[in-house]
């Protein structure tokens, strides 16, 4: 009887693959999978028009910029757009003005991103401790007011903030010199330091709130276990907090690097105007002057494309290097 039952079992096992091969796929017929696929198609149908509109609005200027970078267009000389090949890009390597602007922009980007990421992370950690350690209604209200006050610099328009800093750094009537008891023309003697501080003041709240969300998302049980093991606040900071938020710091630093490299225009234009000399002539200001002062739109487009490529490479290197370390 045992031999018969074993043979029957073997026969059943031998037949089951064939039956499974001939049977229809039941997984595709499950109701929840059919409904999820239907929802996905409906979602794509509703979002496709807006995505197409945004793509067209963003794609057309980018493609026209690339197209114009390979052409010569100087309206004062000729209204025609003539092909120029790689002439506009080749001239960038021999243009000392472009090289100096590239160096100035790199110095500004590195310094401002380091200050913003370190300062924003430190403020986020302090703000988290104050918010979580607040006791009573008054303490919680005070913590919320502090958290709200941090966003004020980021909410102020860039031009208005630049004008305010220009008045504050005035060597005769500025409050900065009044407090320090000096009469230093900051925008003349220390222009790079001035615009770095202004940009850090403006953009540090952006970094702060991203890092604040990252710090507050850490599991509190990790700190409880570390406290039971006898780890102090400094040890918890370097063993738990910083390793947990390091990926977010890498993404934030990469995003700010690209943003600072390509969009630092209004602050420099209002405060120093690119001077004294060429000390603060960053790439966006150089592109603007090439296009609208010299009316050389082909060369300006080539400069813009080069700046965009350099910023993307710079941000990618920063992001992947920090990610590899993590």
Image (tube, rainbow, N blue to C red):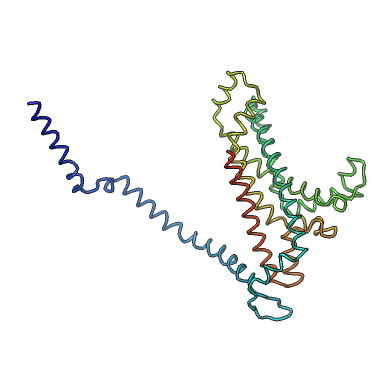
Identify the image quadrant of residue 252: top right
Q: Which residue is at 78% across, 51% downward?
A: 195
Identify the image quadrant of residue 274: bottom right
Left or right: residue 305 versus residue 176 is left
Residue furthest to the front in view is 3
Q: Which residue is at 64% across, 30% downward?
A: 238
Left or right: residue 202 versus residue 39 is right
Q: How many marks?
A: 0
Left or right: residue 42 versus residue 274 is left
Quarter of the image for the N terminus: give it: top left
Q: Position of residue 152 (x, y in %)?
A: 71, 44
Q: Which residue is at 62% across, 33% downward?
A: 242
Left or right: residue 63 versus residue 262 is left
Report the front residue among 172 and 84. 84
Q: Which residue is at 36% across, 48% downward?
A: 36
Q: Position of residue 302 (x, y in %)?
A: 67, 67
Q: Position of residue 10 (x, y in %)?
A: 14, 35
Picture layout, residue 247 above or below residue 272: above
Q: Position of residue 129 (x, y in %)?
A: 65, 29
Identify the image quadrant of residue 87: bottom right
Quarter of the image for the C terminus: give it: top right
């Amino acid at each position: 009887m045992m031999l018969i039952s074993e043979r029957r079992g073997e026969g059943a096992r031998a037949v089951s693959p064939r039956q499974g091969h001939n049977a229809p796929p039941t997984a595709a017929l499950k109701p929840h999978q059919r409904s999820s696929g239907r929802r996905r198609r409906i979602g794509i149908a509703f979002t496709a028009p807006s995505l197409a509109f945004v793509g067209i609005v963003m794609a057309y200027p980018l493609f026209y910029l690339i197209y114009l970078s390979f052409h010569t267009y100087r309206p004062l000389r000729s209204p025609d757009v003539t092909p120029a090949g790689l002439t506009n890009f080749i001239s960038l390597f021999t243009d000392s003005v472009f090289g100096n602007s590239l160096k100035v922009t790199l110095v500004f980007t590195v310094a401002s991103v380091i200050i913003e990421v370190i300062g924003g992370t430190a403020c986020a950690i302090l703000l988290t401790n104050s918010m979580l350690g607040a006791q009573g209604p008054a303490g919680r209200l005070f913590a919320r007011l502090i958290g709200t006050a941090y966003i004020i610099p980021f909410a102020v328009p860039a031009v208005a903030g630049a004008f305010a800093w220009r008045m504050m750094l005035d060597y005769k009537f500025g409050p900065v010199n009044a407090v320090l008891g000096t009469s230093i023309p900051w925008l003349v003697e220390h222009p790079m330091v001035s615009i770095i501080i202004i940009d850090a003041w403006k953009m540090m709240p952006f970094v702060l709130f991203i890092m604040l969300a990252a710090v507050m998302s850490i599991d509190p049980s990790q700190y409880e276990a570390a406290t039971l093991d006898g780890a102090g606040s400094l040890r918890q900071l370097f063993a738990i907090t910083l390793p947990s938020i390091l990926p977010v710091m890498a993404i934030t630093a990469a995003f700010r690097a690209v943003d600072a490299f390509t969009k630092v225009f209004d602050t420099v234009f209002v405060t120093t105007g690119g001077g004294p000399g060429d000390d603060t002539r960053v790439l966006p200001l150089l592109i603007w002057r090439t296009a609208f002062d010299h009316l050389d739109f082909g060369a300006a487009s080539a400069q813009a494309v080069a700046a965009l490529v350099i910023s993307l490479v710079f941000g990618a290197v920063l992001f992947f290097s920090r990610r590899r370390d993590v």
